[in-house]
Image (cartoon, rainbow, N blue to C red):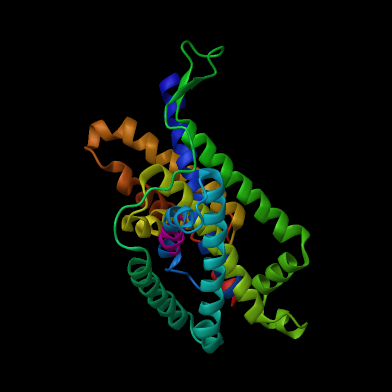
Amino acid sequence: MGFFLETLISGLMTGMLYALVALGFVLIFKASSVFNFAQGVMVLFAALAMARLAEWIPQWTGIESKVLANVLAFIGAALLMFLVAWLIERLALRHLVNQSETTLLMATLGIAYFLEGVGQTVFGGDIYKIDIGMPKDPMFILGNLFDGGLLVDPEDLIAAAIAATLVAALALFFQKTTTGRALRAVADDHQAAQSVGIPLSRIWVIVWCVAGVAALVAGMVWGSKLGVQFSLSTLALRALPVVILGGLTSVPGAIVGGLIIGASEKLSEVFLGPFVGGGIEIWFAYVLALVFLLFRPQGLFGEKIIDRV
């Protein structure tokens, strides 16, 4: 039982990070009906920016505190993602208003390749490390309930806490602020929102900024765990089963879907892997999502896309 719970906890912690990436998909789709294929590259770009700024800031300023350098690097990377969001709206989306969803989809593919190229040119193509001080040594918890306790990775627990904090902040933002209500209005009906004076261009900038911050947090955590490398751009592919399962139009669905996919990946690798061969963790989530599509194509919490048109 203890080993099962250890595997389950590890999967749930990974699932929270998947949910962060999936949130970027959901937020942008809700506001603009665009499936943003650039989300994975945004994670990479944001992580590269933070990793390199954490190196450059002490060299430029003489700051010796690693904590302060990381805080300044995070702020700098966030401001850079805001600039990227503004440029995307100004140079691309503004000129594609009322175009087909296929055209907008192709635009996000172009944005992805552009950001990947610019990231490699500006920040370099090596593997970089983000050191935010998260503990690396496993520890035992719940020793009073289980003999010997459960072995968990504290880095996973901290990463999940960071992800949960961001999710809670986003929920409050959407529910309690005027801008959040405007975003929800645009998500429900673009034309009705415009008719009451809500500017789509400003909303698109805001939602891309929020997606950029989610990408930065995901990139920071993944970079701390695995290092910042260009394979991070494929993280979006790992989030696809999450949005399929949870629903492309649902923020809670991104969270629940992430937890389900994360847990199922780990459990399948440990308990089914010995029977079907290694590598099941790579493809099991896609099979699960495709099977789910047969019964509920819009996802657990999503709405039918036809209802949005």
Residue 202, placed above or below residue 273: below
State which quarter of the image contains the N terminus.
Answer: top left
Q: Residue at x 42, y 32 (%)?
A: 136
User: Based on the displayed image, in which of its 4 quarters is residue 204 positioned?
Assistant: bottom right
Q: Residue at x 23, y 37 (%)?
A: 276
Dominant secondary structure of the residues highlighted in magenta in the image:
helix
Residue 270 position in % (x across, y down)? 33, 31
Confirm whether residue 304 shows in the render.
no
Q: Nearer the viewer, residue 301 or 266?
A: 266
State which quarter of the image contains the C terminus.
Answer: bottom right
Say whether residue 29 is magenta: no
Question: What's the magenta region?
Answer: 42-50
Q: Nearer the viewer, residue 226 or 184?
A: 226
Residue 122 position in % (x across, y down)? 37, 68
Residue farthest front in this picture = 62
On the rendered structure, is 115 left or right of 183?
left
Confirm whether residue 38 shows in the render.
yes
Q: Nearer the viewer, residue 172 or 302?
A: 172
Q: How many marks?
A: 0
Say whether residue 44 is magenta: yes
On the rendered structure, is 40 left or right of 68?
left
Residue farthest left in this picture = 277
User: Based on the displayed image, in which of its 4 quarters is residue 281 positioned?
Assistant: top left
Residue 186 position in % (x across, y down)? 67, 74
Q: Residue at x 61, y 50 (%)?
A: 166
Residue 135 position in % (x across, y down)? 47, 32
